[in-house]
């Protein structure tokens, strides 16, 4: 029985989603996340600093007691974490956890899709910012090849994943010209492309407002080619706005956290690979949970519930204001988006 009251934060938001980073290392160096000139080649805490599978299971069970029903595994690049399918299998067995998803850059997906599906994973999001091989290679910091990611997507389908989400971050002057080709490629395949506004996460990606392409601009450009109509959110707090193609060939999504903040419905916590809880994507500090994890599921749930009840984050609504302007922000690759 769940003896713990489900917590709400100071703005009345429940703790419904957990985004868990399983590793802080990455095989890419995307300029908007982990620029190669700022993040060393061998970056990544050593394995002993990462939560073990036992610790992760305790953590997720505690979050489930607090009302969490959706879990997303992320990184860094989560497919670099050794024995990830074994972890997925353990998490998939947790009662009341309704949904486990994974966000990956797709480079290693072809090798791992089958094992992940067999372990119980059912949802994958692949980040793919460009189809043009040169633009793609450049955006991955010259680490990735688009053919490998497309092969990963095909392998996921062959392994039994039915509908993937394809996330593209659009930066002005970098990959705007990839938007229409991405839609064209995946329209009618069952996969859903979602365009994400370039965000001011962390402090190393040289973010500027004029490098962000608002979703409204993309929606108009896509709609001019393939007429669109708005769709209902699939669940409360869904971050992407959904649009269906009038000709019935699927849908496209937009994540507009800069132009249209959605803090009011943000019920997501993030935990870094070394066990720190962040209550906002733009938080300065995390709270180390390792000691509480060692105390077990019940004590951990009480601890995290108390932290959640003190949460008042709403950075995107305050963006640019004196209250948050000079605040240090955690790097995206530590908490996985
Ligand atoms: N490495 C995996 C990947 O790229 O899918 C998972 C971690 S990555 C940090 C998660 C997501 O964050 C990716 O879809 C990535 O495009 C997105 N992301 C990273 N930096 C971003 C930024 N500055 N603005 C918007 N999205 C960003
Ligand atoms: Fe790596 Fe993902 Fe960040 Fe790109 S967005 S550098 S793939 S963690
Ligand atoms: Fe949630 Fe923070 Fe993003 Fe607002 S800015 S939606 S509180 S993560």
Image (cartoon, rainbow, N blue to C red):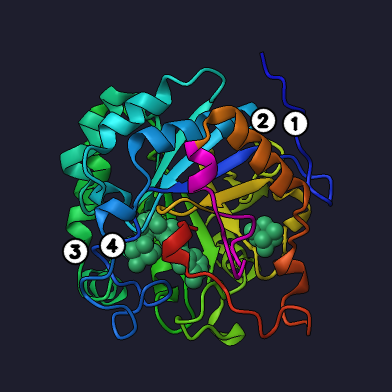
- Element at label 3: loop
Residue 167 appears in which quarter of the rendering? bottom left
Residue 57 appears in which quarter of the rendering? top left
Mark 1 residue's CB less than 8 Å from ligand 3: no
Distance between the Cα atoms at labels 1 and 2?
Answer: 6 Å
Can residue 128 be spotted in the picture?
Answer: no
Q: Is residue 81 above or below residue 257?
A: above
Distance between the Cα atoms at labels 4 and 3?
Answer: 15 Å
Q: Which residues are magenta?
A: 277-294
Q: Is 221 placed left or right of 120 in the picture? A: right
Q: Which residue carries the number 3 mark?
A: 145
Q: Is residue 329 above or below residue 298?
A: below
Dot 2 or dot 4, earlier in sequence: 4
Q: Which residue carries the number 2 mark?
A: 67
Q: Position of residue 143 (x, y in %)?
A: 20, 69
Dot 3 alpha-carbon crowd within 10 angstroms: few under 14, some 14 to 19, many 20 or more: some
Q: Which residue carries the number 1 mark?
A: 6
Dot 1 or dot 3, earlier in sequence: 1
| Disc number placed over residue 26 in the picture, else none | 4
């Amino acid at each position: 029985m769940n003896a713990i009251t489900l917590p709400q934060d100071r703005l009345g938001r429940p703790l419904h989603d957990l985004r868990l980073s399983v590793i802080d290392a990455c095989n890419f160096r995307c300029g908007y996340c982990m620029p190669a000139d700022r993040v060393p080649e061998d970056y990544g805490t050593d394995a002993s600093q990462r939560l073990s599978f036992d610790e992760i299971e305790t953590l997720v069970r505690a979050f489930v007691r607090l009302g969490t029903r959706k879990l997303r595994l992320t990184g860094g690049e989560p497919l670099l974490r050794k024995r990830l399918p074994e972890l997925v299998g353990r998490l998939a067995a947790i009662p009341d956890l309704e949904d486990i998803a994974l966000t990956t850059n797709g480079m290693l997906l072809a090798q791992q899709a089958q094992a992940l599906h067999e372990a119980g994973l059912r949802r994958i999001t692949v980040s793919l910012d460009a189809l043009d091989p040169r633009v793609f290679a450049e955006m991955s910091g010259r680490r990735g090849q688009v053919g490998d990611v497309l092969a990963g997507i095909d392998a996921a389908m062959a392994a039994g994943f039915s509908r993937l989400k394809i996330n593209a971050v659009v930066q002005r002057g970098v990959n705007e010209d990839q938007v229409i080709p991405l839609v064209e490629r995946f329209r009618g395949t069952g996969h859903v492309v979602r365009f994400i506004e370039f965000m001011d996460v962390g402090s190393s990606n040289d973010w500027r407002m004029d490098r962000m392409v608002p979703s409204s601009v993309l929606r108009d450009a896509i709609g001019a080619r393939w007429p669109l109509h708005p769709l209902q959110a699939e669940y409360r707090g869904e971050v992407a706005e959904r649009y269906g193609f009038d000709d019935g060939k699927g849908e496209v999504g937009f994540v507009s956290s800069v132009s249209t903040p959605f803090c009011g419905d943000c019920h997501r916590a993030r935990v870094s690979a070394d066990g720190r809880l962040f209550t906002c994507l733009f938080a300065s500090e995390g709270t180390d949970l390792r000691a509480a994890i060692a105390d077990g599921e019940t004590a951990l749930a009480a601890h995290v519930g108390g932290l959640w009840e003190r949460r008042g984050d709403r950075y995107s609504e305050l963006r640019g204001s004196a209250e948050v302007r000079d605040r240090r922000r955690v790097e995206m690759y530590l908490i996985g988006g």
